[in-house]
Image (cartoon, rainbow, N blue to C red):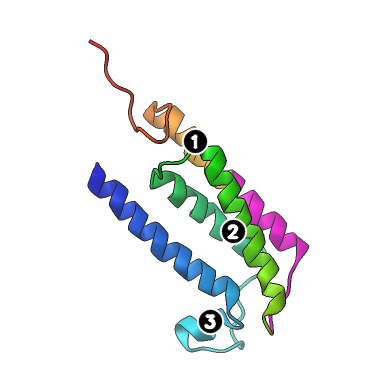
Amino acid sequence: MQVVIWSTRIILVLYATVLTISLLVTDPMAWFWGVGAEITPPDRGVHFSAFLILAVLCMASRLPWRASKLAVLLAAYALATESLQGLIEGRSVELVDYGENLLGLGVGMGLWTLGRRVVLGWDDERTGPPEKSS
C-alpha cells in the first residue's frame, strides 16, 4: 500500500508542476509542445477539469492533513495562480476561472470522499481501510 501512496504522491508533484507552469506562462502550448498561439485549446471547462484532477490526486495521495486544511491550501493555490495571471503578459484574470478553479476542487474532493466511503467503506482518508475487530 505504501508503494501506491508514494507513487500517487510523485504523480501529484509532477501534475502540480505542470499545472503551475501551464497557468503561469504566456503560452503553455508553446512552452510544452513548441507550437504557438495558432492552436488554442477550449477555455471553458479546462480550469474545472484541471483542479478536479488536482483535488483527486491530493486526496488519493493521503497526505497527513485533514481534508479541511487541504481544502484551504488548495483554494489558496487556486486563487493565487489565477490572480498571478494578471501579472503575466498575454494572460488575464477572469472571474469565471476563479469559479471553475474552486468548483473543480470542491467536486474533486467530494467525489473522492464519496467514492472512498461508498465504494471502499473507509471513514478516515488518512488511515485507509478500517481495522477489523476480533
Name the N-terminal-most of marks 1 and 2: 2
The question of residue 58 being in magenta is answered with no
Label 1 neighbour load within 10 Å: few <14, some 14-19, many 20+? many
> Is label 1 or label 2 in front?
2
The answer to which of 72 and 48 lies nearer the viewer is: 72
**In the image, what residue occupies the spot 69% across and 84% down?**
90
Q: Quadrant of the C terminus?
A: top left
Q: Secondary structure at mark 3?
A: helix
**In the image, what residue occupies the spot 39% across and 28% down?**
122
User: Mark 1 and mark 2: span between their CA atoms?
Assistant: 21 Å
Location of mark 3 (residue): 29
- On residue 96, the disc is none
- Classify residue 30 as left or right of residue 88: left
Residue 86, above or below 68: below
Magenta span of residues: 90-106
The answer to which of 7 and 35 lies nearer the viewer is: 7
Q: Amino acid at mark 1?
A: Thr
Residue 61 x/y as whole percent: 38, 47
Name the N-terminal-most of marks 3 and 1: 3
Q: Is residue 110 in sight in this rendering?
A: no
**In the image, what residue occupies the spot 51% across and 67% down?**
19
